Image (cartoon, rainbow, N blue to C red):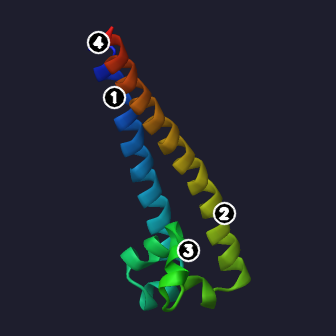
Amino acid sequence: MPILVPVWAGSFGVMLLCAFYWHCRVYSLYQSLDEVGRKFAYTEFSFQFQSSRLAGQLGGAMFRDALSPEQLMQVAAVGRQMRRVMTVVAISGLIGVFAFVWDLVRRGS
């Protein structure tokens, strides 16, 4: 138990910081694309940004359809940054799961 709580708290804290950073970056991108802000709500924009394939399969207008090449480059740059953030979230989640399993195995012995 002594190692489990700090590992869980640390991995949860990292995930919260990543989620806050993700929200700040995507919201600033949403605000910088003025035309998109008039056509889409932020929740719809962030859903399409996070999972564009799923949003395309659901149908409806996509925010990327009406963007200029400069704006598409801006969206792509933020997308690359967010892939790194999602990688950190996945790794910290795996660390938390590993700590839980480690604790279960250690207690079972």
Query: Which residue in the protein does label 4 denote?
Result: 107
Q: Tell me whether circle 1 and circle 3 mark residues in contact (CB < 8 Å).
A: no
Instruction: Mark 2 or mark 4: name the one nearer the start of the chain.
Output: 2
Spatial CA distance of label 3 from label 2 is 15 Å
Query: Which residue in the protein does label 3 denote?
Result: 52
Q: Which residue type carries mark 3?
A: Ser
Q: Which residue type carries mark 4?
A: Arg
Which quarter of the rendering shows the C terminus?
A: top left
Q: Is residue 107 left or right of residue 86?
A: left
Q: Position of residue 99 (x, y in %)?
A: 39, 24
Q: Position of residue 71 (x, y in %)?
A: 65, 78
Q: Tell me whether circle 1 and circle 4 mark residues in contact (CB < 8 Å).
A: no
Q: Which type of secondary structure does the marked residue at label 3 adopt? A: helix
User: As rendered, which of 61 and 21 lies closer to the eye?
Assistant: 61
Q: Position of residue 89 (x, y in %)?
A: 48, 44
Badge 1: few (under 14), some or many (20 or more) residues near its Cα, within 10 Å?
some
Q: Tell me whether circle 1 and circle 2 mark residues in contact (CB < 8 Å).
A: no
Query: Which residue in the protein does label 1 denote?
Result: 8
Q: Tell me whether circle 3 and circle 2 mark residues in contact (CB < 8 Å).
A: no
Q: Nearer the viewer, mark 3 or mark 2?
A: 3
Q: Which residue type carries mark 1?
A: Trp
Instruction: Mark 1 or mark 2: name the one nearer the start of the chain.
Output: 1
Quarter of the image for residue 17 reads top left
Q: Residue pushed farthest front? A: 109
Q: Residue at x 43, y 59 (%)?
A: 24
Query: Which residue in the protein does label 2 denote?
Result: 77
